[in-house]
Amino acid sequence: MRAILINAKKRTVNEINITGDLASLKSSINCRTVAAPYELENGDTVWCDDEGLYVNKDFIELFEEYDPIAGDVLITGTTRDGDTTDCKTTSSDIHNRVMFYDMATLQLKYRLASS
């Protein structure tokens, strides 16, 4: 199935094919445990490393309305039953709205925003 992989370190956005099972989610973002912090407006699910803050120093901010995520991100579609399916989001949707940060730049951004 079609998914979108956002690589925080390389700062790339690519469409990939996965099987949709838990093992493929984990291997796509190179982690031991996954979390699904956001559901996009179109119903797609954003997957990330649940331990990302402990092991990553590169961050992704998907659309300004969502909090930054540490490490790589995978976007898949999700059925009403919670099964993984092809994502509706396109790579151009992501290219236009994703921001990449290292830890220092992200801290500076939020420090300036709170002043």
Image (cartoon, rainbow, N blue to C red):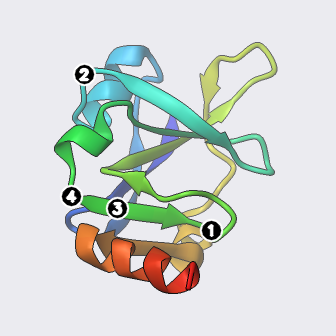
What residue is pinned by disc 1? 63
Observer-nearest residue: 79 or 73?
A: 73
Determine the secondary structure under disc 4.
loop
Q: Residues within 10 Å of mark 3 (few under 14, many from 20)?
A: many
Question: Could you give the CA–CA distance between mark 1 and mark 4, rounded to whole angstroms?
Answer: 19 Å
In this rendering, which labeled residue sits more in front, label 3 or label 2? Answer: 3
Q: Which residue is mark 4?
A: 57
* Pointer 2 residue: 32
Mark pair 3, 4: CA separation? 7 Å
Point 31% across, 79% down: residue: 105
Q: Quick one: label 4, few (<14), some, or many (20+) residues within 10 Å?
A: some
SS at mark 2 in the image: loop
- How many residues crowd mark 1 within 10 Å: few (<14), some (14–19), many (20+)? some
Q: Quadrant of the rendered structure where residue 84 is?
A: top right
Question: Distance from label 3 to label 2 (Cα)?
Answer: 18 Å
Looking at marks 4 and 2 on the same chain, the residue that comes earlier in the sequence is marked by: 2
* Foreground of the two, 86 or 62: 62
Say what amino acid the circle numbered 2 marks.
Arg
The residue type indicated by label 3 comes to Phe
Position of the C terminus by quadrant: bottom right
In this view, the mark in front (4 or 2): 4
Which of the two residues, 113 or 26, is positioned nearer the viewer here?
A: 113
Q: Position of residue 44 (x, y in %)?
A: 68, 42
